[in-house]
Image: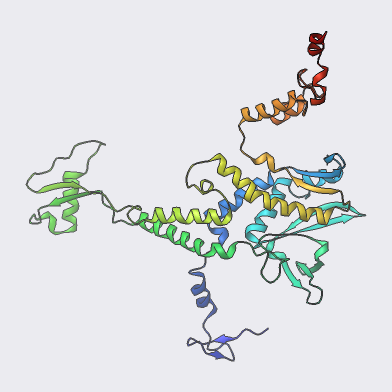
Amino acid sequence: MKIPFFNKRGKKVKDGKQCIGLKEFWEDIKSDYVKLEDNPEILAGIRKIATLISSMTIYLMSNTDKGDERIINELSRKVDINPCNCMTRQKWMEAIVMNLLLHGRGNAIVLPITRDGILEDLIPCPSSWISFHEHKEDYGYDVGINGTFYDSSEVIHFTHNPDKYYPWKGRGITVSLKNIAETLNQSDTTKKAFMKSKWKPSVIVKVDGLTEEFSSKAGRKKLLESYLETNEVGEPWLIPADQFAVEQIRPLSLSDLAIDKTVELDKKTVASLIGVPPFVLGVGKFDAEEWNNFISSTIGPIAIGLQQELTKKLLISPKWYWKFNVNSLYSYKLETLAAVYGDLAVRGIVTGNEVRDKINMSPMEGLDELVVLENYIPLSKIGDQKKLNQEEE
């Protein structure tokens, strides 16, 4: 493909002799360009999501007639403990989510490596390695990884925010955040320039302009050294009353420029688009209800997309599926957990060791049996109570 060249007037030319230099052209483009990953607010919000998702346990579950049960085998250990041989599971999942939401613009590719039908490695591919090529005839697509092409069924393809024209491909949230990233970057630049400015005096000294020393820069410096500079902190100034008048002024602040309000508003907008609470980006205070809503409305749907793709590509049995332990991220008070599970224990629904596990205590011998208080009986057995039978006699 030939790239057309343009002269300074915008007219296409046949060769590059009259075209604008690439260096000047790039300088004009990058002057207003801000990468999303270079914006601290956007990076902090997305990294928070990635950290939370990577901290959840991944369960291998099975559908049974009595309900869903957790399976513990070598496959569950491989995905939840050691999915990639060159990194921990937490870093593996964090890299996937960061590619999904930020670097890969809504796409994250993991390449499975198998040997004799056994899963050996799950390699998260950097976004710079990836390219997509759609099939016009069968609505499928191939995934290019460093120049090698794979059918979409051969790789694990996580997506976020489906594309308008190719729903199998993610689009991410980069378009929505671009303008806000530029505004936040400009606000940061203005703040740095303001803090570096030398025009912020906190004290103004009125001096009689008729004095001889005031007529030159060296003379004004001599006046400051003579009357205003001190050797110790707190030492009083001794100045002539008829020549000097000292006033304190309030310098121009960031509040006067309304930068802090603009930044706060932009941070709230970023938080809303990403789906994190504003206090994650430093705006406002922690709120448990807002946090729990964030877990259920943002973390939960992303986790469901991840577990469905893992189930589709890694499992053959129609009864097995992967599940993230989202409940571990909710904000619970210890006394609330103890009260809820303690009540379940006396009703014979959970064992004592299950209660101890919820409040991070080690199991104890003899607490693996279901127990129930004697006055908790089935509704159909109410008439069989001994005290009622004694009254009849």
The percent position of residue 63, horizontal first and vertical second, equals 85, 45
Picture quadrant where residue 176 is located: bottom right
Picture quadrant where residue 55 is located: top right
Q: Is residue 326 left or right of residue 284?
A: right
**Residue 295 to residue 159: above or below:** above
Can residue 88 be seen?
Answer: no
The percent position of residue 99, horizontal first and vertical second, equals 67, 58
The percent position of residue 68, horizontal first and vertical second, equals 82, 42
Front residue of 308/235: it is 308
Front residue of 90/355: it is 355
Q: Residue furthest bottom?
A: 14
Q: Residue furthest right?
A: 116
**Residue 312 to residue 349: above or below:** below
**Residue 13 to residue 189: above or below:** below
Q: Quadrant of the N terminus?
A: bottom right
Q: Is residue 54 left or right of residue 311?
A: left
Q: Is residue 207 left or right of residue 106?
A: left
Instruction: Tell me the colour scheme of the image.
Output: rainbow
What residue do we see at 76% from left, 26% from top?
A: 353
Tally of marks: 0
Picture quadrant where residue 392 is located: top right
Can residue 43 be seen?
Answer: yes
The percent position of residue 41, horizontal first and vertical second, equals 52, 54
What residue do we see at 32% from left, 54% from top?
A: 256
Q: Residue furthest front?
A: 392
Q: Quadrant of the C terminus?
A: top right
Front residue of 164/142: it is 164
Front residue of 335/280: it is 335
